[in-house]
Amino acid sequence: MSKFFLYLRTDAFRKNLIGSIIFLVVLFVVVYFGLKLYTKHGDSQEVPVLKGLHISEALSVLDKAGLEYEVDSIYQMDAKPGLVIDQDPDPQAHVKSRRTIYLTIITQTAPEIAFPEVLDKTFIEASAILKNHSLKIADTTYINDIARDVVLDVKFAGQPLRAGRMVPKGSKISLVLGNGRGDSEVEIPNLLGLPLSEAKFALAGVGLTLGGVTFSDGSNDSLNSVIVKQSPDTSARIISIGSAIHVTLAKPAAETPTTPTTPQQNP
């Protein structure tokens, strides 16, 4: 122990101690100023407002400010392509020079998605499914089918579309729905005012037949008569194919000729 204290009094120890202190001071100075230079302490600038600008304008602003950038893109329907919708860091934040600014813009090309299953869904259900998949309904057409307002077919660009096919987001889809009538039912045609021959032709065209024929005026002249009554009438709207329509004929009322009046002359 005494040797240790004697060593502390020697010149060698004092020289080593002074050298160590000088080394630590130099190391501290180098690290301090090195970190200051590396982190660019005190060198900061305000992030410009880039939201709402077109990407070309935003990049020009960043180049002038001496800032780096990275661009990501997303797709939004009915949004202007190339528009900056988000930035990180936020506007007016203070950053070092050459800091990377991350931008999110609207892309012009719509990404493709797998078309969802909407067959045999009601129109309301199908509408909700298409909306959730960022798809639009172009138009709807109805065909005879007992399933009223149920999706029977789907078309895209005029071609049948099945679930799982890839389509661009925002695409317009056409739906084919049932009208609730079925293939065995048709609308009742209006036969009033038609001659019997034309009525037979109209009935045959929709798959109906002519039933009983009566005359309201007792003339029995089918060639010069027109239909004045039918049963069932159009108020029933729908009837099964092959059903008979009963009609009543009468001669059209003759127009009474008007006799021109001669103006009286005063003697």
Image: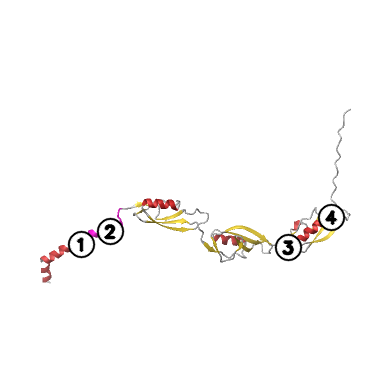
Q: Is residue 35 magenta?
A: yes
Residue 267: which disc? none
Sequence order check: which comes first, mark 1 or mark 2?
A: 1
User: On the image, which quarter does residue 133 sit in?
Assistant: bottom right
Specify the label residue 249 is tagged with.
4
Q: Are marks 4 and 2 in contact (CB under 8 Å)?
A: no
Q: Point out the tag, 3 or 1, that comes first from the N-terminus.
A: 1
Q: Which residue does the numbered mark 1 point to in the structure image? A: 24
Q: Which residue is mark 2?
A: 35
Q: Looking at the image, tell me whether mark 4 or mark 3 is earlier in sequence order.
A: 3
Name the main secondary structure of what is drawn in magenta: helix
Q: Nearer the viewer, residue 11 or 69?
A: 69
Out of 119 and 106, give the one closest to the viewer: 106
**First-in-chain label (3 vs 2):** 2
Specify start and end residues of the magenta stretch as a single range: 25-42
How far is disc 4 from disc 2 in space, using C-alphas? 109 Å
* Residue 87 at x, y percent in the picture: 42, 55
Mark nearer the N terminus (4 vs 2): 2
Give the image location of residue 111, x and y in percent. Answer: 51, 61
Question: Neighbour class for label 3 at 10 Å: few (<14), some, many (≥20)?
Answer: many
For the residues marked 1 and 2, what is the alpha-carbon distance in whole angstroms?
16 Å
Residue occupied by mark 3:
185
Residue at 76% x, 60% y is 205
Labels 3 & 1 near each other (Cβ < 8 A):
no
6 part of magenta stretch: no
